[in-house]
Image (spheres, helix red, strand yellow):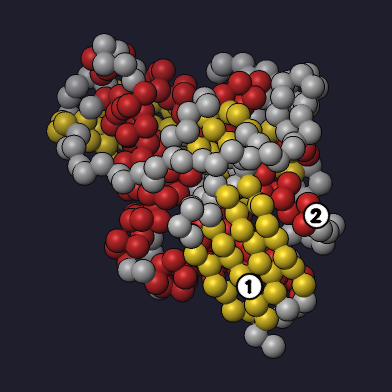
Amino acid sequence: MSRIKPCPECGIPQRITKHNTWLPNGTILEDNNPEHRVVFIENDALRDTYLGVEKMLGVPIDNIITESQRRSTYESVDNALPGFLKPILRWTGTRPITRYLIDQAKLDGKGAVELVSFRRRKRKEDYIKLRIREPFSLPLFCGNFAGAMEAVDGREISITWEETAPHEYELTAHISTHDVELKERLKRRPARYKPGDTKLHRCEVCGVPAIMSRYAWRLDRGIIENKTTGRRMIIISTATQDAIMDELVKELGETIAQAVVDAQRKLIASGFFSREEIKEADDLRLEFAYRGLGNLVEIDFDHDHLFMRLENPCLNEMVAGLAQGLYEQASQRKSRLDWEIVENGDLVVNARSRE
């Protein structure tokens, strides 16, 4: 296991601070690449949104989530690998790619992963088996595992899993004798970001927002948690979530967008955030900025409504539901919601009282 060192000042793992850049426009970019945007969000927000969508639709969506994640990871890893390296990794890449999955899961708060066993002889019945404890999302990790291995091995992968203990699972990647079929590539949304002037107080040593010191990286468990509330956090790609949303709409119809909004609204309105965390508009701007959710440039809130305009938005349905939930939590009123992406790319949200 490779050693992951923390910043001596704020305690954030140095590999997080090295590979992620918090910009003043409300975005977080991995390796400063506009195509690799990530967000830092509560795991419950993601998990409960998917569970809420399943409950509302009465249809399981795990397979759609896994397949979207598989395709997104395959494209990312395949694009990142130099051409000359691919033939070498076809034969020798098992340990490097599993080491990458293990370390990345720990850093991103996705669970504690270990290699159990493998056989890769370019024959029938090849496999790789991993164990994961406290996974952030089993469907998403299965897709990540399959996509990464397909990009390295070049053959089709199917994943099976079993629960071996509470919150512990063994995942087996079954490697077929067939090469990966090149499907239509995911339609990624173009990365066009507006500049911003959000001021985030920074760690004097590593430069990450100082507010990140609120969080502890429990690397032995693969968990990031808020030191005060205990809420679990994850770092996750926006491209993957966009791909999942697009596939859900394609498979289940346009009503999926409203289902995502409603699921997020219910979570937030139930008291997910405390009144101490968000007391005024500047608190909300900060929460959006360091999570990488966008630059909150306009907000107007009173007992009858909440209006906000967000530059460089992402996870649009979740953010719209979050805003509506915050209004209902603060006002203790039911609301109706209007939201849209306007011509300049901003997300505009208006939650108004029904009373």
Judged left or right of residue 81, residue 191 is right
**Image quarter of the C terminus:** bottom right
Residue extending furthest bottom? 355
Q: Secondary structure at mark 2?
A: loop
Residue 276 placement: quadrant: bottom right
Instruction: Give the residue at mark 2.
Output: 277
Relative image position of residue 250 (x, y in whole percent): 30, 61
Relative image position of residue 247 (x, y in whole percent): 33, 56
**Nearest to the observer: residue 112 or residue 163:** 112
Tell me the number on the disc at residue 351. 1
Q: How many marks?
A: 2
Judged left or right of residue 340, residue 90 is left
Answer above or below: position of 336 versus 122: below
Residue at x-position 62% and y-position 34%: 23
Report if the CB atoms under discs 1 and 2 are less than 8 Å apart: no
Q: Amino acid at mark 1?
A: Ala
Answer above or below: position of 232 versus 47: above
**Nearest to the observer: residue 290 or residue 13:** 290
Q: Amino acid at mark 2?
A: Glu
Residue extending furthest left? 178
Within 10 angstroms of label 1, few (less than 14), some, or many (20 or more) residues?
many
Tell me the number on the disc at residue 204. none
Relative image position of residue 295 (x, y in whole percent): 63, 47
Relative image position of residue 158 (x, y in whole percent): 28, 41
